[in-house]
Amino acid sequence: MKYLLLLGLIWLLNGCAGAMMAGTVSGAVMLNDERPIGTQLDDTNTEFRISSALSNDEELKSQCNLSGISMNGNVLLIGQAPNSRLRDKAVQLVQDLQLGGKIHNQIRIGNPVSFTTRSNDAWITTKVKGRMLNDKNLDMTRIKVITENGEVFLLGVISREQADLATDIARNTSGVRKVIRMFDYVEPKP
């Protein structure tokens, strides 16, 4: 019985350590982000509102694969819709939320991608982030990387020099078909 309790305690402590590590990394990313904390929270709330609006529409939910990402008040809509009517419906639904920023419509006309493609996209995102993390000249904590059907979207509030470096890394990662930059630029710190 003692051994079971000890194993249970170790398992719980490992979970706490993982949670502490995740919290520390998330905190470091938030502090290193050029956006004010309020803007970061607004972006998170915006993503939640978009996700809710898209998933509450049965037609979009059943026939499309759609996501909305918010960065610095602007929205990136990605995914697939089987026709332009449903794509336009999704865009209109997000516009009706009156979020205030610009909406970048990158929804492709076509059938929703397969589970295999989504898994491959996750792997591409991991490879791009790993390569960015290994480049000592790039502060990847300021960059959001999203992959959809082999297309890599780069978002962030960074300098043009950092944006060019991040783009070069993404373009030269195997599996990447296209890189789309959606950065807001700031002057580099001296």
Image: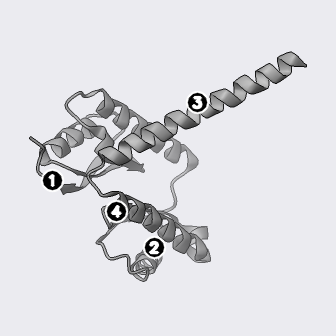
Query: Is 166 above or below relative to 45?
Result: above
> Which one is closest to the eye, mark 1 or mark 4?
4
* Rendered location of residue 1, percent (x, y): 91, 19
User: Of label 4 and label 2, which has the lower sequence position?
Assistant: 4
For the point 25% across and 28% down, the residue is 135
Image quadrant of residue 28?
top left
- Residue at numbered disc 1: 186
Whichever of labels 2 and 3 marks the residue nearer the N terminus, that label is 3
Residue at 23% in and 27% down: 136
10 Å crowding of disc 2: few (<14), some (14-19), many (20+): some
CA neighbours of label 1 inside 10 A, class few (<14), some (14 to 19), many (20+): few
**Which of these two is toward me, 129 or 33?**
33
Image location (x, y in percent) of residue 177 = 32, 45
Instruction: Give the SS element for disc 2.
Output: loop
The kind of residue on which mark 3 rests is: Ala
Q: CA distance from mark 4 to mark 2?
A: 34 Å
Q: Residue at x 30, y 58 (%)?
A: 36
- Upstream in sequence: badge 1 or badge 4: 4
Q: CA distance from mark 2 to mark 3?
A: 47 Å
Q: CA distance from mark 1 to mark 4?
A: 16 Å
The residue tagged 4 is 39
Pick whichever of labels 4 and 3 is earlier in the sequence: 3
Q: Which residue is mark 3?
A: 17
Kind of residue indicated by mark 1: Val
- Identify which residue, 139 or 16, lies in the foreground: 16
User: 121 left or right of 106?
Assistant: right
